[in-house]
Image (tube, grey):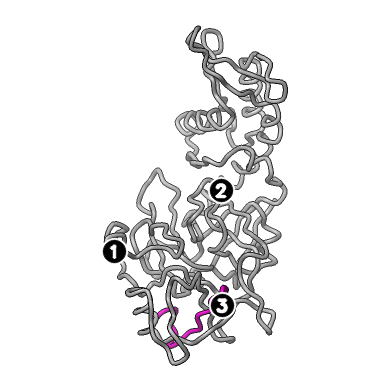
Amino acid sequence: MIGGLDTFEIVSPAEESARWLTVAQMELLLRDGEVKTADGLVRIADGPFRLRRPPDLRQRGGPGSGHFGHEGRPGEVGGSLPSGQSDIYIGVSADLAEPGAHDYDLNSQGIEQPTGAPVRGIVISPDDPRIPDTVFHMTTNLPAVREAGELSARGAGGLGGDKMDQIVSMSADEGIVKQLASDMKFLARLSREMVPTEPLYDFDHETNEWLSRDRQTGEIVDHRAWSQKVVARMNQLDDSAGDWEFNWDFTEHTPAYYLQDWMRQYFIARSSGAGIKNPIIFTDPQDLAAIDPAKVGYVRIPRPNLRTGAMLTDLDLDNPYGLKEVRLYGDVPLTDAEFVGD
């Protein structure tokens, strides 16, 4: 059964209509692209569709999170119901594959997200013994997530992730997520300071050198001074690095780095020098600058909340260098969750 239900309601926002489908009908829709019902023909092309559970199984909705750190899109996720609650969205059903199936198996069978994005990782059960009783999710808008009562898999991906993903990323390690929250605050503060003065680079074919220009005036500027300030501010703003410092020899050569390049170099160096995991954040610094560091935090989620009927995959649980990440291809209700800020 999909989502543990014998039947469920499928809603087409385009038609503003809804009908109840059996699990067998839904499987036909997923396989063949259309299914005949008592009140008409339902086609996947008529979507996007939204699944809605019976009232006794619905959870509160609102703004949510996709990849680690996604603030969510209030007004574009969930749905308004007469009871004031919203449905739990299932993007990819757990019934479509058995635990142990690899993403390449799913891709070869045409199993993908409603957006067309691939499913990534190895399918696992929420009862997998490697998953602790509590899993953890970092968010850039903890107050909004607390108010919503759910993490939404809908929206436009997450920070630095595939914009077509409809997932919620979580980690089995609280220490990793706590560090992610710390790094996100650090990068937000750094970006707010350094993005306005970040130079633009042009390659001069006559001299075979990179020229740096002021973003506002277009005048040639010395990017070495800006780069030195970036490195200095990184060392000052990162509270988790301890006595370790990021050093760069500017005496002979200053690379034509943008702020994002310096961030990557910093985390690679910190990983080897201070032993702190690389958060692998590739978000555009302009997006990071829009984050309010005071709203960054993380959520402790009871493992039973993963049993929604959506597919769960293991991205890197057994990788000692990874983020111990699992991904749910649907909304995560936050019943009995704990919210951790400053």
> Label 3 is placed on what type of residue?
Glu
Residue in the picture at 69% in, 61% down: 144
Left or right of 128, for residue 190: right
Residue in the picture at 53% in, 76% down: 12
Residue in the picture at 59% in, 29% down: 259
Give the secondary structure at mark 1.
loop
> Label 2 is placed on what type of residue?
Leu
Location of mark 3 (residue) = 15
- Residue 38 located within the stretch drawn in magenta: no
Give the secondary structure at mark 3.
loop
> Label 1 is placed on what type of residue?
Ala
Looking at the picture, tell me which residue is in the foreground, 278 or 210.
210
Give the secondary structure at mark 2.
loop
Location of mark 1 (residue) = 101
Q: Which residues are magenta?
A: 1-14
Looking at the picture, tell me which residue is in the foreground, 268 or 60.
60
Disc number placed over residue 200 in the picture, else none: none
Location of mark 2 (residue) = 159
**Could you say where residue 42 lies in the image, as x and y percent from the top left?**
44, 80
**Could you say where residue 48 lies in the image, as x and y percent from the top left?**
50, 69
Spatial CA distance of label 2 from label 3 is 32 Å
**Could you say where residue 55 lies in the image, as x and y percent from the top left?**
59, 86
Looking at the picture, tell me which residue is in the foreground, 29 or 158.
29
